[in-house]
Amino acid sequence: MLDNQTPEQAARERIDQQLRASGWEVQSLAELDPSAARGVAVREYPTDTGPMDYLLMVDGEPAGLIEAKREEEGHRISKVEEQSARYARAKLKHVGKADLRFIYEATGTLTRFTDRADPVPRARDVFEFHRPETLAEWRSQSASFRARLQNLPTLGSDGLRDCQFHAINNLETSFRENRPRALIQMATGAGKTFTAITSIYRLLKHAGAKRILFLVDTRNLGVQAENEFHQYLPQDDNRKFTELYTVQRLRSPHVPTDGQVCISTIQRLYSILKGEPLDEEAEDEPGGLDTLRKEPLPVVYNPKVPPEFFDVIVIDECHRSIYNLWRQVIEYFDSFLVGLTATPDNRTYAFFNQNVVSEYPLEQSVVDGVNVDHFVWRIDTRLTREGGRIEAEETVEHRDRLTREQRWQQLDEDLEYAGSQLDRSVVNPSQIRTVIRAFRDALPRMFSDRHLPEEEGGFEVPKTLIFAKTDSHADDIIHIVREEFAAGNDFCRKITYRIDGDPQSLLNSFRNDYNPRIAVTVDMIATGTDVKPIECLLFMRDVKSRNYYMQMVGRGTRSLDADGLRQVNRTARGPKAHFVLVDAVGVSESKKMETGSLERKPSVPMKELMQAVTMGVRDPDSLSSLAGRLARFSKRLNDEQQREVRKLTGGPDLNTIASELLATDDPDALRRAARETHQLPESAEPSPEQLEAVREERAKAATAAITGPLTTFLEDVRQRQEQVVDDVNPDELEVSGWETDAEIQREQLRQEFSEWLENHRDDIDALTIYYQQPYRRREITARAIRDLLEALKREKPQLAPARVWDAYARLDEVQARRPESELAQIIALVRRVSGWDDQLTPYADTVRANFKRWVFGRHSGNQPKFNEEQMAWLEKIRDHIAASFHITVGDLDYAPFDAEGGRGRMWQLFGEDMEQVLDQMNDEMAA
């Protein structure tokens, strides 16, 4: 806005620009020439109720109007509708009454549109004004699209499942009620795509829809949808869908206008709107940057694909593709939005205005026979549960994660790793082999009818999908699977986005051919891919997202008739009746998180963070997060790699870039820069707009060095980071059986452990205190707990604390992380079994809760309150008791107390009360 413009003039200027961009010629009454263009917008056209802001003329005839308001009036734009309606009924000078059907209210920022030919005219927000040729086409039609939706014929139920019939009926009711968004929730395998195509067919044939978009977020899903359109045979016609209507999957920046159905990834749709080319490989993975962007993607008007280009947009797997990064891409269009998903979350419901036209959960689909149920088979190994330890001075293999080049090096210090670190920083081939071997040996029990004829011998492995943690993990699994099953390369294959060659061909082979029998994936067929013959899912990775887990489980739920199953299983004797979920990591019982809210930044790989910044993501959270990661990553680089970084950035190293990223949002620096830029006095406070403008410039400068080549180089370095290969610790199988059998084993563990404690309550001092003499609880020491643990291991080695912990954690339904120390595990278990705790609780949590209660009690009574320095000492004592169960005056001479002055400093702080305080804490923390 120019300094001498009023808000009304600024709004008119923006509206003029938008009209011209949309193909309108903007004229004043004095220069009116209706033949100058197909669409002419006449400013200040006189009527018998006063001049209207803009009269819209199409093909020389009055067709609509625009009521313009300043931007600040956006919040009360609904009140302006009354004014617009009055002008629409007014008599035009020289013309008289005219059919002003198309009504807009606009501020230059907000544009609202009403079609008075709709059955119940209702204003809706549009991205920008419709093009003149669009309004001309609408005027030539006998009724508006929303009016034609009222006359959809009754849906026949032939060829439709009940859930599909009800979904389409309810969706068409939603259309008739002019609800802009609708959600179809339907279990995986229940036929969401078939439902959508049936609805699309009816919209094209009976409602005269001009063009419909089927939107996906991976190229593979686009191919799958295209195949289903080609196979679809309508209820009322012997010709296939593609013989009646043109279906085009978009593969270039060009969008043909002669097709009725377009299939596109959302990535390509964005590139089309921006007029930019897109490599097909960018469509192979769901958009990962959507989790980063806090601001809407800057979509601008594209005259080749105007907002009215599609009448309806069907969004497949909409739980992934309607948020953050892509939301404005979808909302660019003036279209009905229909979402398809098996696993909606709260965000999905909110986006579709809670207009759920179909709710068909997995459980109901199993009851109805649409999908198949599953059974859980548990495989537990010692290393999976407890991790391992490699002694210092052991010579171990270090393996490059990417090239898999090997070198041998002696460890300088002990290496301890948790089960969660397996196949990431540490690889233990024995652990993978133990799981695969247990799986192989259990298959005849899972599928007892799959034995091959006697002359062939052996067992026919059902189609199995294994979920791996990383590509490197997948390669390890494949190698061991082929060995353990004594099979060749074709038997087991990797199917991920990142394999060389054609992943779609491998996927089709897994679906339709006899081999591969086992497929290993990290990312590709977890969601939205149809492989009906899968009868076994083997989880060798945990999943924390409830939605993602359910999508993965959905890979096995699809039903298949006997002929289809026999096509890839010679020994199958009937239809697919169930599938088996083999849980080798505790995925079926680990705590699952709902998808995070829009405001919460999830953990994002550095590669995606850098790509987002390169694309213009510059919010404070992203820059701060990237700064920390670059600073940490810099420590991994050797001198040669540091030089390459400086070459790619044009000078600065990673630490310099990180420092500049952090400085971007320094509030003092922002104010100083804003004052300098806008020549403000030192005492003046810059406006929010001035600060934002300066911040944008600073962010742009700070991120200039973050380019695609730098991202590629750092990702290559990261992938080449080494893994330690643990060939020292052989794994041991602990559990392999049906989940019901596993629960029986857990109950046996609990009972056996409880009986052992009961039998030793009189002869092991720690148990005597917990069971009979609680007043002695301050005497519980690490030595006492260690004696208890050693006695347990000596007499009952099978009652390893980690195993017993897991048994009680499952019983109590607690998700608390198991302590790494066996001493901490055993004391928590004893407290639980002896009745001190109602449920299994890590001892450190118990101590913290008791400390909080004790301090609160002291401070709420008449006793003197602890000061800040005393509280700091008490917190150190608390942490010592949490780790060592007991504290004495002598402990104050050692770390961490000695660094703070030891017992002498505590005497200065507490005086004669020192020993009393220690006794109280020993007593209260153990309560």
Image (cartoon, grey):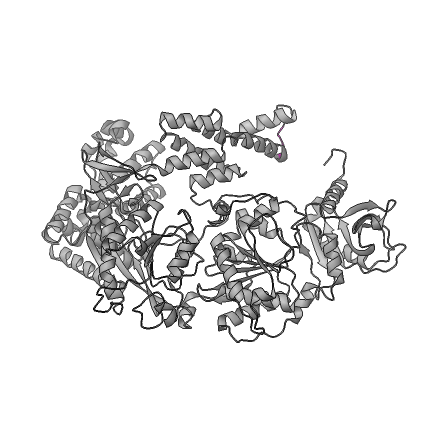
Residue 298 found in image quarter? top right
687 to 764, vertically: above or below: above
Q: Which residues, given as a range, are shown in magenta?
A: 683-687
Left or right: 678, with 45 as reference point:
left
Return the x and y of residue 201 as percentages of the image width and height. 59, 67
Q: Residue furthest right?
A: 94
- Residue beneath the point at 46% across and 67% down: 190
- Name the one closer to the observer, 321 or 895: 321
Q: Quadrant of residue 101?
A: bottom right
**Image coords of residue 683 (percent x, y):** 62, 25
Identify which residue is drawn at 34% across, 55% down: 519
Main secondary structure found in the magenta portion = loop
Q: Is residue 656 visible?
A: no
Asked whether 230 falls inside the magenta stretch, the response is no
When the figure is inspected, residue 199 is found, relative to residue 907, above or below; the finding is below
Number of numbered callouts drawn: 0
Q: Position of residue 50 (x, y in %)?
A: 85, 52
Q: Nearer the viewer, residue 533 or 508?
A: 508
User: Magenta stretch containing residue 685, yes or no?
Assistant: yes
**In the displayed structure, does residue 590 sit left or right of residue 288?**
left
User: On the rendered image, what quadrant is the N terminus found in?
Assistant: top right
Q: Nearer the viewer, residue 284 or 125?
A: 284
Nearer-the-camera pick, 517 or 155 = 517
How far from the left and from the top, in percent, is residue 67?
A: 76, 51
Would you say residue 492 is visible in this rendering?
Answer: yes
Answer above or below: position of 1 versus 250.
Answer: above
Query: Which corner quadrant of the image does residue 58 belong to?
Result: bottom right
